[in-house]
Image (cartoon, helix red, strand yellow):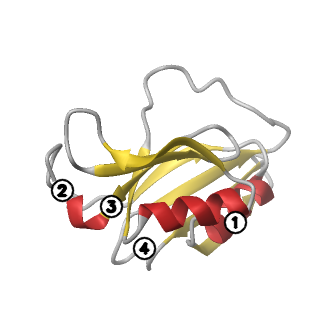
Amino acid sequence: MRMLHTMIRVGDLDRSIAFYTEMMGMKLLRKSDNEEYKYTLAFVGYGDESETAVIELTYNWGTDSYDQGTAFGHIAIGADDIYATCEKIRAAGGNISREPGPVLGGTTEIAFVEDPDGYKIELIQLRHAGQGLEG
């Protein structure tokens, strides 16, 4: 078995696709409309779905926002240089909710950004990915 995708509901599909492709550097892999049930799915990611996990953006027609609740935490993405990535996102108008730097109580370097719907995305310096707090 392997992880396939994570689904998040979005209020403006075009805005979300632009964020994930232009600011986060993902590719739009596929998009489909369901006329009968009034929703559109868009899959974005860094590689082909046959090889890597992706994000499914679900837009329910006519719904422009969601109550995210308190259960969901964040999506984590490894980056070669989280400092440069944050500057690129900031320059494009994105929201950096936690500046890059060491995690509290450790040495792993992280940052947090938010997508247009407020979903948190943790950026982890790739050399630290999978190493726990001390990295």
Judging from the image, what secondary structure is the residue with disc 2 in? loop
Q: Nearer the viewer, residue 108 or 122?
A: 108
Residue at the location (73% across, 64% down)? 18
In the picture shown, does residue 39 fall above or below 72?
below
> Label 1 to label 2, Cα distance in Å?
34 Å
Q: Are marks 4 and 3 in contact (CB under 8 Å)?
A: no
Q: Amino acid under label 2?
A: Gly
Hey, what amino acid is under mark 4?
A: Glu
> In the rendered view, does 59 fall on the left or right side of 43?
right
Amino acid type assigned to the residue bearing label 1 in the image: Ser
Judging by the rendered image, the residue that carries numbered circle 4 is: 49
Between discs 4 and 3, the one toward the N terminus: 4
Residue beneath disc 2 = 130
Which circle marks residue 125 in the picture? 3
Rounded to the nearest angstrom, the CA distance separating label 3 from label 1 is 33 Å
**Earlier sequence position, callout 2 versus callout 4:** 4
| Residue 37, position as x, y percentages in the image | 74, 45
Residue 59 shows in this picture: yes
Residue 66 image offset from top left, x and y in percent:
69, 29
* Image position, residue 41 (x, y; %): 65, 58
Q: Which residue is mark 1?
A: 32
- Amino acid carrying mark 3 in the image: Gln
> In whole angstroms, how far apart are the C-alphas of marks 4 and 3?
23 Å
> Is tag 2's residue or tag 3's residue first in the polypeptide sequence?
3
Viewer-nearest of discs 4 and 1:
4
Q: 10 Å neighbourhood of mark 3: few (<14), some, or many (≥20)?
A: many
Distance between the Cα atoms at labels 2 and 4?
A: 21 Å
User: Can you tell which of label 2 and label 3 is closer to the viewer?
Assistant: 3
Q: Secondary structure at mark 4?
A: loop
Which of pointers 3 and 1 indicates the residue nearer the eye? 3
Quadrant the N terminus occupies: bottom left
At horizontal 69% and vertical 44% (from top left) the residue drawn is 10
